[in-house]
Amino acid sequence: MSKLEVVILAAGKGTRMRSTLPKVLHRLANKPLLQHVIDTAYALIPHAVHVVYGHGGELVKQGISDEGIQWAEQAEQLGTGHAVEQAVANIEDDSTVLVLYGDVPLVTAQTLQALMSHVGDGIALLTMQLDNPDGYGRIVRNIEGKVERIVEQKDASADELAITEVNTGILAVDGSKLRSWLRRLENSNAQGEYYLTDIIAMAVADGFEVSALVTKDEAEVAGVNDRVQLAQLERVYQQRQAERLMRAGVTLLDPNRFDLRGTVECGTDVVIDTNVILQGKVKLGSGVSIGSGSILTNVVVGDGVEIAPMSVIEDAVIGNGCAIGPFARIRPGTELADKAKVGNFVEIKNSQIGTGSKVNHLSYIGDTTMGAEVNIGAGTITCNYDGANKHRTVIGDNAFIGSDSQLVAPVTIGEGATIGAGATITKDVGQGELSLSRVPQRAIKGWRRPKKEK
Ligand code: UD1
Ligand code: CA
C-alpha cells in the first residue's frame, strides 16, 4: 500500500464572500469550512495532510486546530496546478495524492475511499452530471467513453460546452507521476493559469488510464463561493445530522428547526422540541426532554431531565431527574446534583447545587457550594463580587433561605439554618439557627398621602 498524502487547496481569496475573513474560515455548523475538510482528511488515516494557503496567510493557520498539518504557502494564486505544486515537495514518492478543496466542506470519507480504490497507477477523478454545467471544467471522453482530458469552461469550444459531465475538482493520483506531470504544466490558456486539470491529457498520452467516479450527490461536492451557498450547505448538513439522530432513536419535533453545531451523544427516548441549538460537546441521558428555544453548549445531562423552553446552559453538568427552566440560565462551572430544580429567571454560575435542592424563581446564585434539600426563596441573590474579588457562599443541607435575601460572600449558612425573608446576611449563620435582618415594621396611623395641588 502506498502512502496517502492529502493536499487541500485553500489559497483562493473568496471575493464573493465580501468579507475580511478568508473564505475557508467561514463557519458551517460553527466550524471553519477548512476544518471540515481537514477532519474528513484525517478520517482517512493519511500519511500527511498538506494545506496550501495564500489569501489570509497567517489568519488561516491560526483559525485551524493544527494536528501536524503540513502548511505550504502559495504566495500568488497562479492556478490549481501551481497550488498543488507548492505541496508536492513534501510528499513521499511512493504515495497516492488526494486533492481536496478547502471550500468544499461536505465531501465524505466514504466517497473519497471509493475514489481512491479507482486510482491504480494513474488518476481517478470525481465527476458529476449536471443539467447546467456552467462554470465547471468539462470531462471530454473519446468514442469508447474513456476520459481523454478536461477542458475548462473558458477554453471550451461550443461542442465541449454542451458536455454535461463536469469535474468536481476532487481527484486522486499517483504521487511520483503527479510530480513529473506538474513540472510539464504550461499556462498558455484563456486564464493564463497553471491548470491541475491539464495532467489528465498528460496521463492519457503517457498511456495511463484515467477513471472517473460519477457522484450523484451534488451537495457533497458543492463549493462555497458566497453566503447564499454557505447557508444552503448549512441546511444540507443540518438535515443530514437530524436524520442520523432520528434514525438513532431521537425525537425531533421538527428536523428543519434543529441545529447541532458540534457533537451529541443521546440515550434512549430523547425528545427535542423546535429551535433547539446544541453546541460543542453535548451528552444527553435517556428520557431527556429539551424545550423549544433552548441552547446547550458543552453540557452533560443525566437521565430523565426536563429542560423547559428558552433555557441557556453552558459548560455544566446536570444530574439525573433535574428540572430546569423555563428561562433558566446556567453558566460555566455549574453542577446540579440529582433531582435539583432551577426555575424561571434564575442564573447560576460556577456553583454546586446539591441533591433535591430548589432554586425556583428569580435568583442569582454565583460561586456557591450548596448542600442537599436546600430551598432558595424567590429573588435570593448571592453577592459574590466586591468590585475586585469573587467570594464563595456555602449553604449547608436542609437550609431554608427566605425570599428576597442577599447573602453577602464570603459567608456560610449552617445545616438546617433558616433565613427570614428580606434578610441581608453578612455574618455566618450557625447550624439550625434562624437569622433575621429586617427593619421592624411600624404603623403610622392617620397618615395622609401627599396630593397634587390643583
Ligand atoms: C476548478 C477546476 C474545474 C472544476 C472546478 C470545480 C481547474 C483548472 N479547474 O475550477 O475543472 O470544474 O474547480 O469547482 O482546476 N486555488 C488555490 N490556488 C490557486 C487557484 C485555486 O488554492 O492558484 C483553490 C481555490 O481556493 C479553490 C480551488 O482551488 O478552493 C478551486 O479554485 P477555483 O478558482 O474555484 O477553480 P475553478 O476555476 O472553479
Ligand atoms: Ca470554483
Image (cartoon, rainbow, N blue to C red):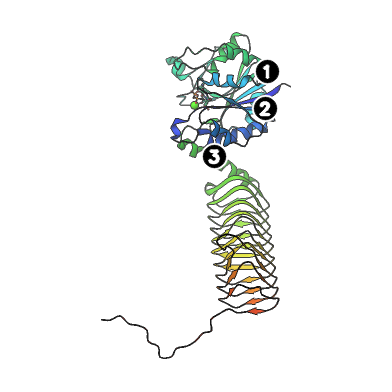
Q: Which mark is residue 48?
A: 2
* Disc 2 packing (10 Å; few <14; some 14–19; many ≥20): many
Q: Earlier in the sequence, mark 2 or mark 3?
A: 3
SS type, badge 1: loop
Determine whether label 2 and label 1 are within 8 Å by CB. Answer: no
The vertical placement of 268 against 61, above or below, is: below
Which amino acid does the dot numbered 2 rest on?
Ala
The vertical placement of 32 against 129, above or below, is: below
Task: Return the x and y of residue 345 as percentages of the image width and height.
Answer: 53, 64
Q: CA distance from mark 2 to mark 3?
A: 24 Å
Circle 3 residue: 28
Q: Earlier in the sequence, mark 1 or mark 3?
A: 3
Q: Which mark is residue 199?
A: none
Task: State which quadrant residue 347 falls in.
Answer: bottom right
Q: CA distance from mark 2 to mark 1?
A: 20 Å
Horizontally, residue 95 falls left or right of residue 182, namely right
Q: Nearer the viewer, residue 243 or 17?
A: 17
Which amino acid does the dot numbered 1 rest on?
Gly
* Disc 1 packing (10 Å; few <14; some 14–19; many ≥20): some
Circle 1 residue: 120
Determine whether label 1 and label 3 are within 8 Å by CB. Answer: no
